[in-house]
């Protein structure tokens, strides 16, 4: 069978004829970046032209379409105008919304009614943006899975009694968690797996009854641990393996350990802050940091990689088992938070799938280009919130549709003829393959994953086209008592139920926040002092403890070997190559 897009393919092949590894200047940040042989091979396989945007700026644009850092608004549903619902968009946002139950109801509405004929005199991109403003979007971006008493969750599935959390699944009784799976009865979490009865945990899995944990596995009954494995009953330790009853990395017997910690009252905020400072200093001065966390991943360059092959510029990628199928990652370039992904480039929170380019938030899909929030789709391009669709171009909100352009239905032959013309013109204009611009994101930049991983001030974000709205600090709390941080009891044991009728003013941002009954019960049960920092600020603090998605060149502190790492070489910390790290720590 011949090409369905002959004009586009002919133009693309001409680009490929003279395409060799070279250096380009990014049209967004003006930094130079390389297009290397590996990129070219994948461009050809994906049938996309090389872009004039660097991988970092492409990543920023995708992440700016993910409002997942704990900011919620109220906005009226487009179908039920008197219904003011929880939303990721506010009333000043020009994009329209539907209540999630209504949006997902196959009998309630059909986005095909918003279809329009493409005016060839206009830019296709401009026509797409108009469509995105006309078609209502989900009030809360989430897949249509089991949710019980978890209204304030985003990208959630199979959750029960979860509050203010995002990208969370198969979890119960979790508050303020981001990238959380198989977790119960825990609070303040960032990228965790199999955690129970724990608080303030980052980049860790299989943690039980512990607090203030980072980059640990299989640890329990411990506090203030960094890079520890298979440890229990340890306090303020780094780089431990298979240990018990350690205090500041000193091995003690059980009685001595218990005597040491019995006088450390972590139910008091002042004490916790004191030990947080000590912990930070311990990590900076004593801990050995591995250059990159890569396991069973030949030919991989990135960080936090497991079961990957030939993955370059990829971060947080691992294998996954789903419905008795085991998914791995192979031949991925410039990806973040992926699983079961093959022959893909520029993918964020995606998998399993293959042959996709410049997409974010996709599940079980193949051959997708420049799209957002899609599931079980095949060969769609520039599609947003489309479910179980194939052969669609520039569409929004469609379910179980084929051969649609700008939500208008065509015959198969008509579809391919028009798509050929559109893609050829977009390629000539240098925009084919590019993701939605920052100015056209559904969300404010400071509400998004991009802000957490690639923070910008308002003054720097707006010139890039990012959308921004200053948070309105409203302390007119009606019947609520307003408390400044100094008014909040230092010890959780001194907190009464009256706190549930109070608004606490964040000591950093001055934004008010409340404590829920579920939170209060958790803090009391686990002897955690009441927070005086806004939940979003606490999340951003956790992000600051993680390294950026960027490879830097440095030298091993121990042997001086040249290494790749995500740690800033200017930091005065111990960064070891894999060989030196394994000799010293394992």
Image (cartoon, grey):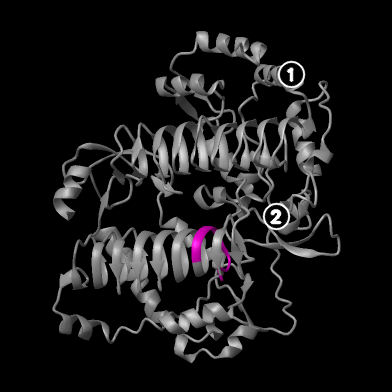
Instruction: Provide the residue span drawn in magenta.
Output: 161-171
* Residue 538 visible to the viewer: no
Q: How many residues crowd around disc 2 within 10 Å: few (fewer than 14), some, or many (20 or more)?
A: few
Which numbered disc covers residue 2?
none
Q: Is residue 162 highlighted in magenta? A: yes
Is residue 454 shown left or right of residue 469?
Answer: left
- Residue 207, above or below 12: below
Residue 304 picture location, percent across and down: 36, 47
Foreground residue among 529 and 275: 529
Q: Is residue 186 magenta?
A: no
Q: Position of residue 39 (x, y in %)?
A: 45, 24
The residue lying at 71 percent from left, 62 percent from top is: 73
Vertical placement of 327 versus 73: above or below? Answer: above
Query: Is residue 431 left or right of 333 when viewed as pictured?
Result: right
Q: Earlier in the sequence, mark 2 or mark 1?
A: 1
What's the residue at 55%, 20% (across, down)?
47
Which disc is residue 413 wearing? 1
Under circle 1, the secondary element is helix
Q: Which residue is mark 2?
A: 469
Q: Which one is nearer the viewer's eye here, 171 or 204?
A: 171
State the quadrant of the C terminus.
bottom left
């Amino acid at each position: 069978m011949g090409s369905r897009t002959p004009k586009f393919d002919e133009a693309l092949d001409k680009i490929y004829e003279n395409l060799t590894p070279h250096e380009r200047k990014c049209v967004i940040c003006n930094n130079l970046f390389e297009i290397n042989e590996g990129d070219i091979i994948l461009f050809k396989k994906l049938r996309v032209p090389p872009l004039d945007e660097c991988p970092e700026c492409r990543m920023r644009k995708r992440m700016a379409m993910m409002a997942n850092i704990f900011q919620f608004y109220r906005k009226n549903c487009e179908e039920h105008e008197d219904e003011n619902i929880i939303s990721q968009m506010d009333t000043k946002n020009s994009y329209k919304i539907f209540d999630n139950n209504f949006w997902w109801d196959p009998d309630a509405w059909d986005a095909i009614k918003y279809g329009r004929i493409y005016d060839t005199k206009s830019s296709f991109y401009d026509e797409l943006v108009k469509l995105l403003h006309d078609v209502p979007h989900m009030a809360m971006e989430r897949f249509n899975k089991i949710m019980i008493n978890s209204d304030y969750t985003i990208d959630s599935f199979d959750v029960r009694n979860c509050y203010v959390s995002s990208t969370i699944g198969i979890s119960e009784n979790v508050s303020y968690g981001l990238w959380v799976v198989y977790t119960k009865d825990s609070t303040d979490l960032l990228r965790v797996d199999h955690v129970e009865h724990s608080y303030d945990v980052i980049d860790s899995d299989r943690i039980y009854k512990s607090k203030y944990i980072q980059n640990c596995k299989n640890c329990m009954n411990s506090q203030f641990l960094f890079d520890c494995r298979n440890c229990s009953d340890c306090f303020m330790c780094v780089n431990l393996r298979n240990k018990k009853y350690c205090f500041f990395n000193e091995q003690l017997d059980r009685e001595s350990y218990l005597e040491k910690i019995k006088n450390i009252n972590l139910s008091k905020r002042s004490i916790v802050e004191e030990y947080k400072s000590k912990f930070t200093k311990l990590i900076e001065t004593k801990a050995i940091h591995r250059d990159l966390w890569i396991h069973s991943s030949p030919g991989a360059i990135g960080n936090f990689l497991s079961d990957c092959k030939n993955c370059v510029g990829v971060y947080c990628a691992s294998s996954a088992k789903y419905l008795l199928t085991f998914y791995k990652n192979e031949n991925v370039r410039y990806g973040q938070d992926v699983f079961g992904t093959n022959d893909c480039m520029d993918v964020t929170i995606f998998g399993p799938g293959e042959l996709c380019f410049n997409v974010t938030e996709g599940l079980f899909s193949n051959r997708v280009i420049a799209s957002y929030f899609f599931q079980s789709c095949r060969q769609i391009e520039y599609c947003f919130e489309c479910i179980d669709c194939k052969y669609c171009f520039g569409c929004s909100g469609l379910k179980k549709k084929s051969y649609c352009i700008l939500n208008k239905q065509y015959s198969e032959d008509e579809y391919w003829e028009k798509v050929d013309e559109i893609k050829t013109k977009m390629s000539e204009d240098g925009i084919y393959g590019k993701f939605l611009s920052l100015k056209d994101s559904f969300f404010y930049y400071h509400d998004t994953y991009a802000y957490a991983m690639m923070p910008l001030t308002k003054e720097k974000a707006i010139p890039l086209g990012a959308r921004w709205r200053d948070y309105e600090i409203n302390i007119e709390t009606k019947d609520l008592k307003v408390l400044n941080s100094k008014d909040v009891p230092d010890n959780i044991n001194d907190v009464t139920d009256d706190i549930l009728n109070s608004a606490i003013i964040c000591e950093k941002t001055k934004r008010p926040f409340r404590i829920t009954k579920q939170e209060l019960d958790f803090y009391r049960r686990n002897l955690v002092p009441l927070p005086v920092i806004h939940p979003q600020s606490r999340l951003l603090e956790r992000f600051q403890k993680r390294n950026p998605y960027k490879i830097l060149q440095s030298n091993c502190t121990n042997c001086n070997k040249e290494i790749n790492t995500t740690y800033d070489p200017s930091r005065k910390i111990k960064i070891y190559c894999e060989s030196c790290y394994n000799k010293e720590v394992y």
